Image: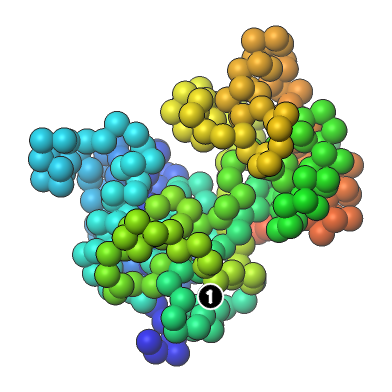
Amino acid sequence: MSSDPTWGVVATIKAPAQDILNFAAHYLDLGAHRVFVYLDEDAPDARSALKRHPKCRVILTDENYWKRRRRAKGRPGGHQHRQVLNATHCYSRDPQVDWLFHTDVDEFLQPLAPLTAQLAAIPPGVLSARVRPIEAMQPDPADPPTPGQIWCKGFDPMLGIRREQTAALYPRYGEHLNGGFLSHVAGKVFVRTGQPDITLRIHSAFVGKTRDSNPFDLFDCQLVHLHAPSWDDWQARFRYRLNHGSYRPDLDANAKHSKTALTMHQLFSLLESEGGEDALRAFYDEVCVATPDLRDRLDALGHLHAVTLDLEATRARHFPNFA
């Protein structure tokens, strides 16, 4: 591999056209050689804009696509299954990059040092490299950040320390949370291309049936996750996540190794059944709003991150004809 490796990103997306192009533009702005978008639901304006960009590849995963891919089986019922199949399909068809990053439409890489240099420094025998997430918080209306900036929370990589800190930071709900995150702390991975028998899962790569359990850590890169960046956004996605997504019933508790932690499905169902929207709002306000007090406590632990993320301006640079 050259000293200046190329990289690309792949995602299966069901979202409004603006969100799709925000995602693509962000990664193009970072220097992606290829952006692969598998549309889980058609977004004609985004599809047209992506087709016109020389570094983007867009695939509409409609009924005919799944008939070609899976014949009698057709379209998989679970979104996560479709993500895995599409990412692996992309990987196996020569994505024309040295490294492929599998992520979601609401996740945005933030390199703290040149990304190509970080990838070039990965030892030759390493298959995958992990980027840890930081989770966006809603600005406090009474004390907002400067324009174009968002506040994000991080977490300690050591599980025992993380559990203690989570309980202290979020006294009412921390017992059921992992790092105070509503979503994953596992992060996402870059995978070295050109390797045989590879499957790209949501958070890791597999060789055959064996997970690559020791990925290289890209400590100078963060993954900003806009999982619940505002109350309205969280509520708009809440019901789907509760039934089919990251809060669905079959998932284990986020707070690993706790004997008393509820799963996210159990926690949110309990809050909603006992107190309705007001109880969910109380949870959100404690855990997800960047109040001065929470920011101070996160900052004291080294877990407060100020991120500049101007998605509209970035989209306008790369897709100027999209209104």
Q: Quadrant of the N terminus?
A: bottom left
Check disc 1 and report its element: helix, strand or loop.
helix
Are there few (<14), some (14-19), or many (20+) residues within 10 Å of tag 1? many
Q: Is residue 247 left or right of residue 104?
A: right
The one nearer the camera, 197 or 282, is: 197
Across and down, in percent, residue 297 comes to 88, 48
User: In this rendering, is residue 115 above or below 13?
Assistant: below
In the picture, residue 187 is in which quadrant?
bottom right
Across and down, in percent, residue 146 comes to 75, 52
User: In this rendering, is residue 246 above or below 236?
Assistant: below
Across and down, in percent, residue 63 comes to 16, 36
Which residue, given by chain and number where applicable, does mark 1 sit on? Answer: 115
The one nearer the camera, 35 or 63, is: 63
Question: From this viewpoint, is residue 35 visible?
Answer: no
Residue at 66%, 23% in the rendered image = 267
Circle 1: residue type = Leu
The one nearer the camera, 103 or 39, is: 103
Q: Is residue 153 left or right of residue 220?
A: right
The one nearer the camera, 263 or 277, is: 263
In the picture, residue 316 is in which quadrant?
bottom left
User: In this rendering, is residue 152 above or below 171?
Assistant: below
Residue at 36%, 37% in the rendered image = 79
Across and down, in percent, residue 47 comes to 27, 48
Residue at 61%, 29% in the rendered image = 264
